[in-house]
Amino acid sequence: MSTLPEKVLPWAKLDDPAENYHLASKLSRWVSASSSAMYAHELVNDPEALASFGVPSASYPGTERYELKSSSWGSRVSEVLRARHSAQSFSAALVSTQIFSTILRESACVTESYGRGTPSAGGLYPIDIYLCVNSVQGLPPGIYSLDPFAAVVNRLPLREDPRAFLQETLVFQNLAENSAFHVFFVASMARLRIKYGQRSYRFALIETGHLAQAMIMCAQEYGLASCPVGGFIDQNVDDLLCLDGVEQSVLYSVAFGQPDYLEGRRA
């Protein structure tokens, strides 16, 4: 047996920049308007300020340029992409259980035969999906979680009225008015960090984008309207779902509902 004293490694006092950024970028009741209102007002009222941002692409004068050919294939994918837009309102009509199920199954559920329709770093599936269901045929209004492996939604034992919660939580409350269901994407960082360390936060954001886009495209295919929503009171969602706001926290959301065909006619 060795008689040498045990060497104790010094504890590295490291800060986590990903956690710092996540906390600093949250909205609250006190900063949701003030954090962006000043810049929005300037852009709307000062064309020169808007122009100062330049063309939203990289330009390389003096390089060889090759023009892309016109699209020649009329697939369903291209039709869905061209038809997609961010809805500003919804009609109050119900969404069928079949369409609701198809959107979740095709975009977020994991199967033995073909995996999942969206990629996940390392196959770790760190994004959990929660839903505020308001107007889906066959489902009572409530807060639900998706089990992507069993392809079921679980109604959580919460007394919160889903529409009232959305009106309290979304910065743009008009999206809560008639939405059929609203999806919140929650990251469980421990699932990623054990393999990817500091790069985990990037992968969580990337996967959330994959999932949201897949759901939006499925919804468009079946004639539903949608709107990606990044403006919400983070703490409301974290508190509702008993998340600590760091290791588990909401990242993004999307509203879904039947199209409001009067939307374009309103002033």
Image (cartoon, rainbow, N blue to C red):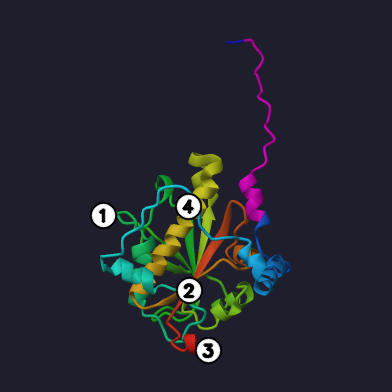
Where residue 190 appears, x then y in whole percent?
A: 53, 47
Element under label 3? loop
Q: Earlier in the sequence, mark 4 or mark 1?
A: 1
* Depth check, front residue: 204 or 70: 70
Question: Callout 3: few (<14), some (14-19), or many (20+) C-alpha neighbours within 10 Å?
Answer: few
The Cα atoms of the two marked residues, 3 and 2, are separated by 16 Å
The part of the chain drawn in magenta is 3-23
Where does label 1 land, which residue?
Answer: 113
Q: What is the number of the mark on residue 86?
A: 2
Instruction: Give the amino acid at mark 2.
Output: Ser
* Residue situated in front as seen by the camera: 256 or 98: 256
Residue 259 visible from this viewpoint: yes
From mark 2 to mark 4, how far is it between C-alphas? 26 Å
User: On the image, numbered disc 3 is attached to which residue?
Assistant: 266
Q: Is the residue under label 2 in contact with that under label 3 (CB below 8 Å)?
A: no
- Give the Cα separation between the discs numbered 4 and 1: 21 Å
Q: Position of residue 75 (x, y in %)?
A: 26, 67
**Mark 4 Cα shell of 10 Å, populated few (<14), some (14-19), many (≥20):** many
- Please name which of the two marks, 3 or 4, marks the residue nearer to the observer: 3
Is disc 2 in contact with disc 4, using a CB cutoff of under 8 Å?
no
Rate crowding at label 1 as few (under 14), some (14 to 19) or many (20 or more) other CA atoms within 10 Å. few
Q: Quadrant of residue 172?
A: bottom right
